[in-house]
Image (cartoon, rainbow, N blue to C red):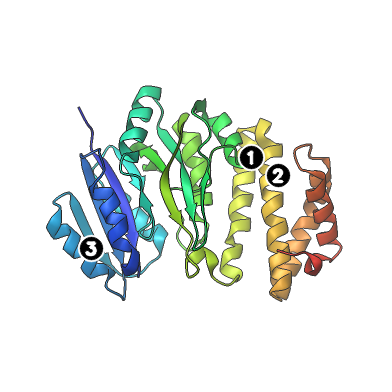
C-alpha cells in the first residue's frame, strides 16, 4: 500500500516559473501526495497561481504567510505536513515525472531513511547532469564522507526523500542563506542509512536573478560559522572524517577570503584571513587537501587574495 508523501514548495515571487514546477509535481506517477505550497509573502502573482492550483487538485494545500525566507517557509511546511515522508522542491525548479516513485521504492527496498538522486543543472546557456553516477546504500559515516568529498551526494536539501521523523528535532536555521549546509549533515547523521539512485530526477535552475547569484555580501558569509559548527560536530562524533570535513571547510574559507577581498569588505576580510591563518598548520598537515589548495591558503594568508581570478 502506498504511503502519503508530503511535498513542500516554498514560493516567493516566482510567478514566471511556478506553473512548470507544480505541473511536474501533480503529474507524478506516485499519486498519494500532499502538496504544500507556501506563499512566503509574494508581491507578484505567485499567490494567485497557488490558489488556482488548489482549485484544480484537492491534494494541494496553500498557505499564505508574511515573508520570512525559505527556512521559515520550509519549517512551517514541515509542521503542517501529514505525510510519512517529505520531499522538498524549490518553486522555480521542477522534477522528473517518476522521481518521487523511484525514490520511494528505493527507500523501502534499501530500508534507508534518506533516498537521494542526482540532478540536472540548468543555466541560461547549458544543461549538465550531476551526482547521478552510482547506486549505493551506505551508513551515516560513509554518506557524510561522500557529502564532504562531493562523491555523488550534493549539499542541498532538495533531490532527496526523507522519513518525516528525521525532522522531529531538526529544523532549518532562520536567517542563514546556507540553510541546506546547516541541516543536511545532521539529517544524515540521524538517518543511520542513506541510499542513492544513479539517476538525475531534479531540475535545478540557476537563474541570473536567483538568490545564489546575488552580489556577494556579508549575509553570505554565514557559510563560515555554519561550517565551523559542522567541523565541531564531525570531530566529536566521526573523528575518522576530520580531514574530510576540514578539507571542505578550507575550500569555503579560501573562497570567502578571496571574495571579501575583491568586494572591499575590509572588516570581514581581516577576520576571515585571521581564521585562515589560525587553521594554516592543520591545513598543511591534512593529507586530503590538495597541494594547490595549500598553496592558495598560504598566499591568502600573505595577503595576495586580490590576485586570484574567481
Checking the image for residue 149, the label placed there is: 1
- Depth check, mark 3 against mark 2: the one in front is 3
Rate crowding at label 1 as few (under 14), some (14 to 19) or many (20 or more) other CA atoms within 10 Å. Answer: some
Relative image position of residue 192 (x, y in whole percent)? 47, 29
- Depth check, mark 2 against mark 1: the one in front is 1
User: How far apart, in angstroms, are the residues tagged by discs 2 and 1?
Assistant: 8 Å
Which label's residue is closer to the chain start, 2 or 1? Answer: 1
Q: Residue at x 68, y 74 (%)?
A: 263
Dot 3 corresponds to which residue?
50
Rate crowding at label 3 as few (under 14), some (14 to 19) or many (20 or more) other CA atoms within 10 Å. Answer: many
Does the CB distance between marks 3 and 2 fall below 8 Å?
Answer: no
Which label's residue is closer to the chain start, 3 or 2? Answer: 3
Furthest residue in direction right, as rendered: 302
Q: What secondary structure is marked by label 1?
A: helix
Dot 2 corresponds to which residue?
247
Furthest residue in direction front, as rendered: 125
Relative image position of residue 308 (x, y in whole percent)? 78, 64
Does the CB distance between marks 1 and 3 fall below 8 Å?
Answer: no
- Using the image, determine if residue 11 lies above or below residue 266: above
Relative image position of residue 268 (x, y in whole percent)? 69, 69
Amino acid at each position: 500500500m502506498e504511503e502519503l508523501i508530503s511535498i513542500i514548495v516554498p514560493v516567493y515571487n516566482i510567478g514566471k516559473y511556478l506553473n512548470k514546477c507544480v505541473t511536474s509535481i501533480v503529474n507524478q506517477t506516485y499519486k498519494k501526495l500532499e502538496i504544500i505550497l507556501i506563499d512566503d509573502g509574494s508581491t507578484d502573482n505567485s499567490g494567485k497561481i497557488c490558489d488556482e492550483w488548489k482549485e484544480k487538485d484537492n491534494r494541494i494545500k496553500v498557505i499564505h504567510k508574511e515573508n520570512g525566507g525559505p527556512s521559515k517557509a520550509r519549517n512551517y511546511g514541515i509542521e503542517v505536513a501529514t505525510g510519512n515522508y517529505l520531499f522538498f522542491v524549490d518553486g522555480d525548479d521542477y522534477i522528473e515525472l517518476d522521481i518521487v516513485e523511484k525514490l520511494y521504492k528505493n527507500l523501502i527496498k534499501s530500508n534507508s531513511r534518506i533516498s537521494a538522486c542526482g540532478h540536472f543543472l540548468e543555466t541560461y546557456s547549458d544543461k549538465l547532469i550531476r551526482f547521478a553516477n552510482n547506486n549505493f546504500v551506505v551508513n551515516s559515516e560513509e554518506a557524510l564522507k561522500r557529502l564532504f568529498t562531493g562523491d555523488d551526494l550534493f549539499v542541498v536539501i532538495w533531490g532527496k526523500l526523507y522519513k518525516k521523523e528525521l525532522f522531529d528535532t531538526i529544523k532549518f536555521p532562520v536567517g542563514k542563506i546556507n540553510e541546506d549546509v546547516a541541516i543536511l549533515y545532521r539529517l544524515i547523521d540521524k538517518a543511520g542509512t542513506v541510499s542513492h539512485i544513479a539517476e538525475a530526477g531534479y531540475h535545478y535552475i540557476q537563474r541570473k536573478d536567483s538568490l545564489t547569484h546575488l552580489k556577494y555580501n556579508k549575509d553570505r558569509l554565514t557559510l563560515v560559522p555554519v561550517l565551523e559548527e559542522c567541523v565541531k560536530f564531525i570531530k566529536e562524533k566521526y573523528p575518522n572524517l576530520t580531514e574530510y570535513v576540514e578539507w571542505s571547510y578550507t575550500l569555503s574559507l579560501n573562497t570567502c577570503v578571496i571574495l571579501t577581498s575583491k568586494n572591499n569588505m575590509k572588516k570581514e576580510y581581516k577576520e576571515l584571513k585571521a581564521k585562515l591563518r589560525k587553521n594554516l598548520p592543520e591545513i598543511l598537515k591534512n593529507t586530503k587537501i590538495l597541494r594547490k589548495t595549500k598553496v592558495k591558503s598560504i598566499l591568502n594568508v600573505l595577503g595576495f587574495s586580490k590576485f586570484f581570478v574567481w
